[in-house]
Image (cartoon, helix red, strand yellow):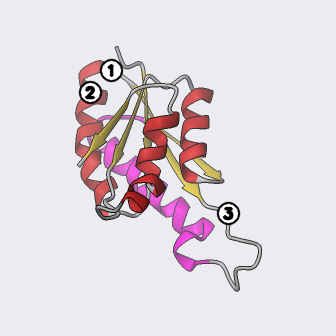
Amino acid sequence: MFKTVLFPIDQSREAREAADVVANVVQKYGSRLVLLSVVEEPPKDAPSADPMVSPEVVAKLLENAQALFSGQGIQAEVLERQGKPAFTICDVADEIAADLIIMGCRGLGLTDEGATDSVTTRVINLSPCPVLIVP
């Protein structure tokens, strides 16, 4: 049913919590798992790059996630991309023919503004495949 599962990850608590659901789905369906980390391009007028998204930090994040799944007997492929997170997640889902995107939900508040700016909301609206949001 879900031959390919895309799991976009970042350093959030929500992504770590979604990892259990990802492992369960991948094991149940024998899915191919693709881990994706998207580094947002800094604005041209930004004074300096955020050290939390350096190439080394992203590589370590992907390595740790891959090791987490490997410890559960799941082989995961890793991808690192640069761009706008929601658009990049959907582009990668299309590129790898993902059958499902699983991602954590990061709350931005209850205002209409916060809801429309959410990466999660954008992925839900733009995705070429079903999206499972883990609260």
In space, the residues marked 3 and 1 are separated at their CA atoms by: 34 Å
Q: Which residue is mark 3?
A: 41
63 and 134: which is toward the camera:
134
- Answer whether labels 2 and 1 touch (C-beta < 8 Å): yes
- Disc 3 secondary structure class: loop
* Tag in front: 3 or 1: 3
Q: How many marks?
A: 3
| Residue pictured at 31% horizontal, 60% vertical | 107
Position of residue 11 in the picture relative to residue 48 (left or right)? left
Asked if 114 appears above or below 3 in the picture, the reply is below
**How many C-alpha atoms fall within 10 Å of the one at disc 1: few (<14), some, or many (≥20)?**
some
Extent of the magenta region: 50-75
55 and 43: which is toward the camera:
43
Asked if 2 appears above or below 49 in the picture, the reply is above
Q: From this viewpoint, is residue 124 visible?
A: yes
| Residue pictured at 22% horizontal, 33% vertical | 24
